[in-house]
Amino acid sequence: MELPTAVYVIWIVVLIVAYMSVPLLLYALTCIVMAARKIKLYAEETHGASSAIGADLGNVVALNETESLLTVAHGVGDEIAEEAETIVKVLVQRFEGAR
């Protein structure tokens, strides 16, 4: 039993298409692998940067303490300003009384 010529033609066309698609598949796989490597590098850089940011976030608690200390210092500054005004008033009174 011999195969018809159409079967041979179809078989040859399928083989040609398969052999021609191999370079395209290799190109596509190469692009995918290169993109995956870039993603891996970006992920490593991002991980390193986020670790450094995480280490610096430990100092945020100290900012709360700084804010409370500045509030206290502002209050002390206000008290000093009030006392300085009182001293100025007394000195002005003494100066005017001495004339």
Image (tube, rainbow, N blue to C red):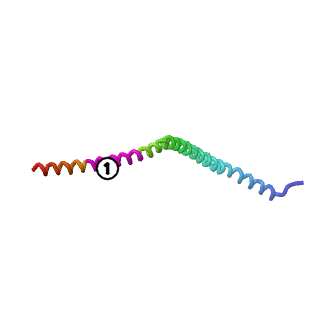
Q: Nearer the viewer, residue 53 or 77?
A: 77
State left or right for residue 32 relative to residue 63: right
Q: Residue furthest bottom?
A: 6
Residue 9 location, x and y as percent? Answer: 77, 56
Residue 10 location, x and y as percent? Answer: 77, 57
Secondary structure mostly seen in the magenta stretch: helix
In the image, residue 10 above or below residue 65: below
Question: Is residue 22 magenta-colored?
Answer: no
State left or right for residue 50 relative to residue 97: right
Amino acid carrying mark 1 in the image: Asp
Q: Nearer the viewer, residue 27 or 36?
A: 36
Q: Residue furthest right?
A: 1
Q: Residue furthest left?
A: 99
Q: Which residues are magenta?
A: 67-83
Residue for point 27% across, 48% down = 83
Q: Crowdedness of circle 1 by 10 Å Cα count: few (<14), some, many (20+)?
A: few
Name the image quarter holding the N terminus.
bottom right
Residue 33 location, x and y as percent? Answer: 61, 46
Residue for point 70% across, 50% down = 19
Residue 7 location, x and y as percent? Answer: 81, 57
State left or right for residue 95 relative to residue 80: left
Q: Nearer the viewer, residue 56 or 47?
A: 56
Q: Nearer the viewer, residue 69 or 85?
A: 85
Residue for point 35% across, 45% down = 73
Question: Is residue 69 magenta-colored?
Answer: yes
State left or right for residue 70 relative to residue 17: left
Residue for point 15% across, 48% down = 94
How many numbered marks, from 0 up? Answer: 1
User: Which residue position is annotated with label 1?
Assistant: 78
Q: Secondary structure at mark 1?
A: helix
In the image, residue 65 above or below residue 4: above
